[in-house]
Image (cartoon, helix red, strand yellow):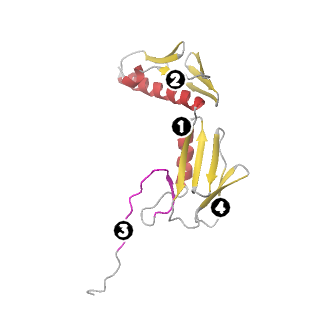
Amino acid sequence: MSRIGRKPIELPKGVDVAINGSLVTVKGPKGELKRTFPPQIRVLKEGNVVRVQREGDEDEVRALHGLSRALLANMVKGVSDGYQKVLEIGAESVGYRAEMSGGKLVLYLGYSHPIEFPPPPGITFSTDAKTRTITISGIDKELVGEVAAQVRKLRPPEPYKGKGLRYQGEVIRRKAGKAGKTGKGK
């Protein structure tokens, strides 16, 4: 049996789980999330604890067991604490900056024009000019990660000069580039 799938999910104060067949709704202080689970997976609420059980022992059902439990735990953590990803503008990226304008994220990334990135529903952006960071926040872990990846994709970090957007704490291996001509031999 899946070790992750067997672990119970304890509900923090203020979080409520409603189960309607395969549709699970999690409500908390930060918002509400809904997800439909496969029919082979059953979600049971026992007091202040939620458990995920599987019906069957096939490989596919066993894989869904741990996945479903992890997704449900992410929903519970999202509505209680929320998630955030932080992107950094590389120190070598001269002229690159990010700012908020009318609720939109406006990025100046060395192109001939600024890039406006409106936040999808459930996502909030914030920028800090001093630390050169962009913070992406929301209650849906999957959506926060996807939006952070889309913003990073606008100017990914490059290994030669170190310019671009990177996740906070991400290490980019630097390359030397070409050595140039030495003048020896023709």
Q: Earlier in the sequence, mark 3 or mark 4?
A: 4
The amino acid marked with disc number 2 is Phe
Q: Kindly identify which residue carries mark 3.
A: 176
Q: Kindly identify which residue carries mark 2.
A: 37
Position of 78 with respect to 116 (left or right) is left
Q: Is residue 21 magenta?
A: no
Residue found 62% across the figure and 26% down from its top: 28
Q: Kindly identify which residue carries mark 4.
A: 114
The amino acid marked with disc number 4 is Pro
Q: Earlier in the sequence, mark 3 or mark 2?
A: 2
Dot 2, how many residues are within 10 Å of its Cα: few (below 14), some (14-19), or many (20+)?
Answer: some
Circle 4: element type: loop
Please give the label number shown on residue 36.
none
Marks 3,2: beta carbons within 8 A: no
Tell me where the magenta segment starts and ends, as one range: 162-178
Marks 2,1: beta carbons within 8 A: no
Marks 1,4: beta carbons within 8 A: no
Dot 4, how many residues are within 10 Å of its Cα: few (below 14), some (14-19), or many (20+)?
Answer: few
Residue found 42% across the figure and 15% down from its top: 55
Q: Is residue 165 magenta?
A: yes
In the rendered view of the protein, which quadrant contains the C terminus? bottom left
**Is residue 55 or residue 76 the one in the foreground?**
76
Marks 2,4: beta carbons within 8 A: no
Circle 1: element type: helix
Q: Nearer the viewer, mark 3 or mark 1?
A: 3
115 to 84, vertically: above or below: below
Q: Nearer the viewer, mark 2 or mark 1?
A: 1
Dot 3, how many residues are within 10 Å of its Cα: few (below 14), some (14-19), or many (20+)?
Answer: few
Residue found 39% across the figure and 62% down from its top: 174
